[in-house]
Amino acid sequence: MSFRQWRTASRVHGCWPASYVSACTLHRYLSFWIRQGDGRATNSSFPDSGDVQDNPAFPTYALRYGMTAVALLGFQVLRGTLFTQMSLRAASSLHNQVS
């Protein structure tokens, strides 16, 4: 494997953990946000959390969630682009060896 091929492969494989971490963060943050409810503290074990949109920190939660979703989308697009680039180079290399 040449250095160029190794470098491209490491980029593709490097994007996988980044996209995985982004997805996990997105899901974990969404569950945290939903548990916050309307932002009122309750002492019962089964609180009526109310509507999330009534929470005073709603714009902050929405911004963080949106930014994480955009980062996830960016990592997925980058990963797909690099995978396609690597596959085309590998196919060209194989074709040139056979010809």
Image (cartoon, rainbow, N blue to C red):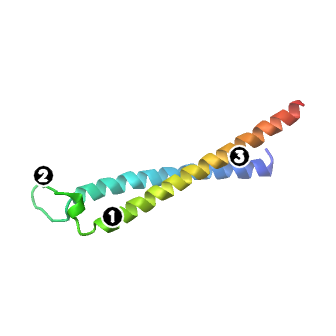
The image position of residue 73, as x and y in percent, is 51, 53
Task: Give the residue drawn at x 80%, y 38%.
Answer: 92
- In terms of sequence position, does the residue under pointer 1 or pointer 3 come before the other? 1
The residue tagged with tag 1: helix, strand or loop? helix
| Marks 2/3: CA–CA distance | 52 Å
Q: Is residue 17 left or right of residue 2?
A: left
Query: Marks 2 and 1: which is nearer the front?
Result: 1
Q: What's the residue type where badge 3 is placed?
A: Gln
| Residue pictured at 35% horizontal, 54% vertical | 28
Find disc 1 in the rendering and name its residue.
61
Q: Which residue is mark 2?
A: 46
Q: How many marks?
A: 3
Residue 36, numbered label: none
Disc with the residue nearer the chain's start (2 vs 1): 2
Neighbourhood count class around disc 3 (C-alpha, 10 Å): few under 14, some 14–19, many 20 upward: some
Q: Residues within 10 Å of mark 2 (few under 14, many from 20)?
A: few
Q: Amino acid at mark 2?
A: Phe
| Tag nearer the camera, 2 or 3 | 3
Q: Give the labeled residue for mark 3.
A: 85
Residue at (26%, 55%) from the top-left corner? 34
